[in-house]
Image: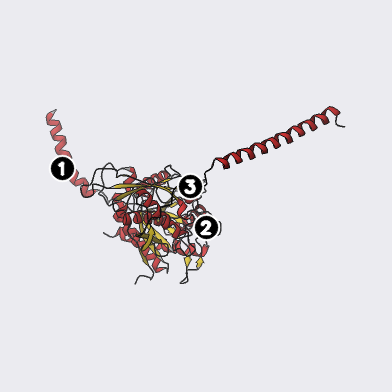
Amino acid sequence: MRWNSWALATAIAVALPAAAQQAPPAPAARFVVVLDAAHGGDDSGGRLTSGQPEKAVTLALSVRLRSLLAARGIAVVTTRESDASLPPNARAAIANHANAQVCLSLHATESGSGAHLFTSSLAPASSSLFTPWETAQAAWVTQSLALAGALNSALLHAGMTVTLGRTGLIGVDSMTCPAVAVEIAPERDSDNSITAEPDNPDYQARVAAALAAAVLEWRTEARQP
Amino acid sequence: MIPRYQKILFIVLLAVSLAMGAELWHLRQRAHQRLLAGEVTAPTQAPEVAPDQQATLLVANDTDDSLLTQDRSLPLPADPGARARVLLGKLLDLYAASDSTHPVPGGAAGVAQVFLLPAAGPKDPQSPDAEMAVVNLTGSFAATHPSGIETENLTVLSICGTLRANLPTVTQVRFLVDGAPRPTLAGHADLTRTYLTADAVPTTATNQEPAQ
């Protein structure tokens, strides 16, 4: 019996390197983007000057961006497709189950101008086996900052004013993916007069196109060795 | 055809209703007179006017997501809690002004109280007198605050920064609304966490020109 066990172990030891040599190369990890249209249902979020609730604007932007990304062959997971109520933790759970490479939390506001990009204010931490839910994003903060940089470049290239910031956001702080909260504010001219509201379809189309370009750039960089 | 007894009943009920209304009005007037009679309107103590002192406010600017330092001369009470409330009241008055760079309605009345407590957590040997400020905002202030990540974040950070600039022992800040915890200020800024005043410095930058 002891001899048989020894022989089996030897056989496995000899066979494993050979099997490793013959195994086909592992397929590249699927590139998944999570789009989280903030608010929804009972939670209307803010209200724009036009009277539109924030939840409707974020959903419209999410649908628009999903179409653009899907047309480029990118797998997209959305946290909501309708006017549904979803707590922040459920949004983070969807993002974490998707094992995504990009997580965008979409918001809209009447304050400020252009696009506001917010990453978690958690201090960067190394990944561990057991991660606290409230601070799960800490292991991804460095990548989130890099993603915010890519989004910033694309939005600036599209001629928009961009504000970068860091803050604590329930939901985003629990995401285990490169995560950025994108807040669309009115577009203003040099006199600070509003030229386009966040619910303006043309303005949304430009924002969505810039975000899609940034995600494509991010995917290209992620695939480079 | 309405029966006669119903007519009589209606007239009686109407008369009773009018009599009760008149009695209620009479009682209200008596209570009001009693209240006025008991109120002492004569001043019993001379008002104390605190001397003007230099104060530093960290004023938010929505245009470039910045916190700008403004020095003001204000009459400040000696009590630290009352002092903090006056400072934050002045800050919110600036936000309620028509030419505000961070428009938020409500003004000084938005801060109900500020309590100062020993800081939570292990004691820092470098700042043994560290304190936590508990800022109790009014429900009307939170209800009328513009909604958005940037604008809510700026309000919170400017409050923390103003407290730090004038009361250096305050290292932590927590927020209540109408005396109770609340998840967010107006849907975005997390009010469940403890803010560190050391974080209340401008950490953002605005890019106005396209990248080359």
The residue wearing badge 1 is A14
Q: Residue at x 74, y 32 (%)?
A: B16
The secondary element bearing badge 2 is classed as loop
Towards the viewer: A212 or B98? B98
| Residue that mark 3 sits on | B139
Would you say B74 lies left or right of B18 here?
A: left
Whether label 1 touches label 2, CB < 8 Å: no
Q: Upstream in the sequence, badge 1 or badge 2?
A: 1
Residue A44 picture location, percent across and down: 51, 50
- Residue A194, numbered circle: none
Q: Nearer the viewer, mark 1 or mark 2?
A: 2
Tally of marks: 3
Measuring from the top left, give residue B78's x and y in whole percent: 34, 51
Q: Residues within 10 Å of mark 3 (few under 14, many from 20)?
A: some
- In the rendered structure, are the residues bearing label 3 and label 2 in contact, judged by CB atoms less than 8 Å apart? no
Mark 1 vs mark 2: tell me if same chain.
yes
The quadrant of the picture occupied by the C terminus of chain A is: bottom left
For image coordinates 14% across by 27% down, the residue present is A1
Q: Chain of mark 3?
A: B
Mark 1 and mark 2: Cα distance apart in space: 68 Å
Q: Looking at the picture, which amino acid does disc 1 mark?
A: Val
Chain at tag 1: A
Q: Residues within 10 Å of mark 2 (few under 14, many from 20)?
A: many
Report which residue position mark 2 lands on. A48
Q: Is residue B92 visible?
A: yes
Q: Position of residue B178 (x, y in %)?
A: 45, 44
Q: CA distance from mark 1 to mark 3?
A: 72 Å
Q: Which is nearer the eye, A138 or B136?
A: B136
Colour scheme of this structure image? secondary structure
Q: Are marks 1 and 3 on the same chain?
A: no
Callout 2 amino acid: Leu
What's the distance in space between the residues labelled 3 and 2, CA to CA? Answer: 21 Å
